Image (cartoon, helix red, strand yellow):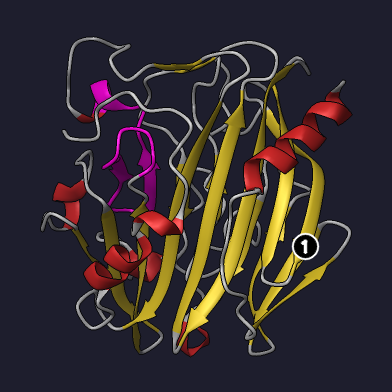
Amino acid sequence: MVRFLTALCLLSSFACTAFAQDDRVRLEQHEDRISVHIDDQLFTEYIFQGYEKPILYPVIGPHGVRMTRDFPMKLGTPNEADDHPHHKSIWFGHMKVNGESFWHVGDNAGTTEQTDVSVQEDTLRSVNRLVDRDGQLVAIDSRELRFSAQGDLRFIDYAVTYHAVLSPITFGDNKDGQMGIRMHPSLRIKGPVASGQAINAKGDRESDIWGKRASWIDYWGDIDGHVVGIAMFDHPSNLRHPTWWHARDYGLLSANPFGIHHFEEQPDPKLGDYTLPEHESLTFRHRFVFHPGDYQQAQIADLYQQWAQPESAEPAAASDGDDSN
């Protein structure tokens, strides 16, 4: 039964994707990870064994600069905080999926277990089982990650489709979720080596971006003598676009459409709940941009508009009608 469902998910989720291949990108498949090279230099690795969920680590940006935190994959890096061990570089997962946490790690959290993976040119595709703490299947997701480059810019297009294969899936209102990155400590707004600045698509700055809705956010700062930055995009086809952002001054950035009562300080604790009906699917698409310079030098607003054109992705499988808010 599970093999049949995973095969079906893989076929149905990715049939519409169409990109020109990036000849600068080379993927190598290994037993526990997929290594991604740009111009024969390591860009990142998609690690799908050894942790409670698949992660991308490390991430090497312009000038050969490490863009994400080492902890907890690597211990002892100077100036890194050892907080939040579930913040593993780049990852995907929500705090409340049918009541189970796929954001945290530990005895009270579920796990995301990969069952299938394939590599084709500059793209990897995978199927995963979302399993609760008792080992019961909660849902299946299928993922497509595409890697590309343009000059000194590095891109990761990260698409995830939830499949309600056994029962409806309810995503509970909680601030902790779902497409996340924990950045290099120098990109923090506050901290011993913090040099970061941040802005969202609406012009909110630094700590004021937390909990706000926006199409994109960009952080930038000085790392090892180079000004570099990280932008994260929310696609217009995503549920409740523009999304809310769990954007902390200590280096966490995540796009989360389900945390409305937290972000907007509303009294109803279920205001952000969303239920995906049984046998239906729901897709989220995001883009990471790793760039030299600040957000203006990288022309982040223009890059977002180019990426967000209708032909870049099919519409999401579900919407709640909040897109105009």
Residue 87 spot, x, y in % from top left: 52, 47
Q: Quadrant of residue 20?
A: bottom right
Q: Is 66 in front, or is 92?
A: 92
Percent position of residue 209, x then y: 19, 49
At x 39% / y 46%, what residue is drawn? 254
Q: Secondary structure at mark 1?
A: strand
Check the image and report above or below for 204 versus 140: below
Q: Magenta span has 255?
A: yes
Q: Residue 308: x, y in percent?
A: 34, 58
Using the rendered view, name the quadrant where residue 136 is placed: top right
Q: Please, is residue 203 above or below residue 208 in the view?
A: below
Q: Quadrant of the C terminus?
A: top left
- Residue 192 appears in the figure: no
Q: Nearer the viewer, residue 63 or 138?
A: 138
Tell me where the magenta segment starts and ends, as one range: 237-262
> Would residue 218 appear left or right of 140 to someone viewing this image?
left
The quadrant of the image that shows the N terminus is: top right
In the image, 204: left or right of 277?
left
Whether residue 239 is visible here, answered yes or no, is: yes
Q: Check disc 1 and report the residue beneath it.
A: 119
In the image, residue 20 sits, relative to residue 305, either above or below, namely below
Name which residue type carries label 1: Val
The question of residue 229 being in magenta is answered with: no
Determine which quarter of the picture holds residue 79.
Answer: bottom left
Which residue corresponds to the image point at 37% horizontal and 50% vertical from the top-left? 235
In-front residue for pair 239/312: 312
Residue at 60% over, 79% down: 22
